[in-house]
Amino acid sequence: MNHTYSKKGAVIVSITILPYIDQTLLQQQKEAIANSKKQEVLNQFEAALNAAASALETIQADQKAFSATASPASSVTVSSEPYSISSQTAPVTSASLNCPAELEAYFKEASETYGVDERLLKSIAKTESSFQSDATSHSGAMGIMQLMPATASSLGVSNAYDARENILGGAKYISQLLQQYQGDTSLALAAYNAGSNNVNKYGGIPPFTETQNYVSKVLGYYNSEEL
């Protein structure tokens, strides 16, 4: 800021007045603005990751739901109406339903840890893999409880082919689904097979033949006396 003073017969004097700037405060403001912009970018990135994860879960669940019945020459007709399955589905009777003795302790531990009926866990395992710890589906589901890679990771399962880890992971997952659907076993099983997004989309058990058969089969084992 310049000010010039003059007086007749006097020397002209020019004085420059610089406004005082708090450099420390200015730097703090710059850093605050930069951090704010960084946080905004991080928030957008996190939202994009969450959306991608949700989409991946739906895709993987759809692959799993159709892998058992899909073929290049087949056509699939899907009704828009949700499917209803009674929890009193007729039991499946077969001596082959017996759980291997070496897995009993793992199912017991998983049941006690996550508060899920041990029989339900065994019924899921029988339906998913027939208790085979090295089972891998065409859609990529792994182990005894057939956990998809993304699901296994979210459950903290580092080795999906380890029997104990897999059973505990599956128990944790079905426990979360039972809580999500207020204890409705049929809906929880449908979500385990086809994904929560599909259950929510159709307002019930999705009208996928494989999922409908899956829920009926698990409940059939669950109501049997062979496990």
Image (spheres, rainbow, N blue to C red):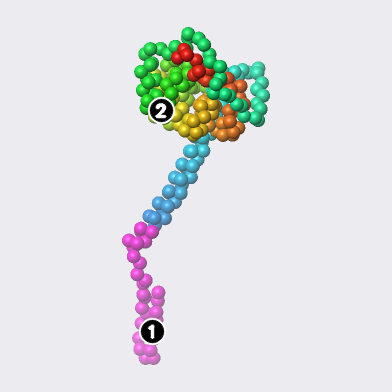
For residue 104, the mark is none
Density class for disc 2 (Cα within 10 Å; few <14, some 14-19, many ≥20) is few
| Above or below, comparing residue 141 to residue 97 in the picture | below
Q: Is residue 39 magenta?
A: no
User: Could you say where residue 158 lies in the image, as x and y percent from the top left?
Assistant: 38, 26
**Tag 2: amino acid:** Gly
**Tag 1: amino acid:** Tyr
Q: Is residue 24 magenta?
A: yes
Residue 137 visible from this viewpoint: no
Q: CA separation, marks 1 and 2?
A: 89 Å
* Magenta part of the chain: 1-29
- Which callout, 1 or 2, points at the residue further toward the start of the chain? 1
Which of 22/100 is in front? 100
| Above or below, comparing residue 101 to residue 157 in the picture | above
Q: Secondary structure at mark 1?
A: strand
| Above or below, comparing residue 21 to residue 67 in the picture | below
At 60% from the left and 19% from the top, the residue drawn is 70
For residue 115, the mark is 2
User: Could you say where residue 172 lies in the image, as x and y percent from the top left?
Assistant: 42, 28
Instruction: Give residue 199's quadrant in the image.
Output: top right
Left or right: 75, with 221 as reference point? right
At 44% from the left and 45% from the top, the residue drawn is 42
Residue furthest top as drawn? 95
Residue denoted by label 1: 5
- Judge depth for marks 1 and 2 and give the one in front: 2
Left or right: 39, with 52 as reference point? left
At 57% from the left and 24% from the top, the residue drawn is 86
User: Could you say where residue 23 lies in the image, as x and y percent from the top left?
Assistant: 34, 62
User: Could you say where residue 57 lies in the image, as x and y percent from the top left?
Assistant: 51, 31
- Whether the residues at callouts 1 and 2 have beta carbons within 8 Å, the answer is no
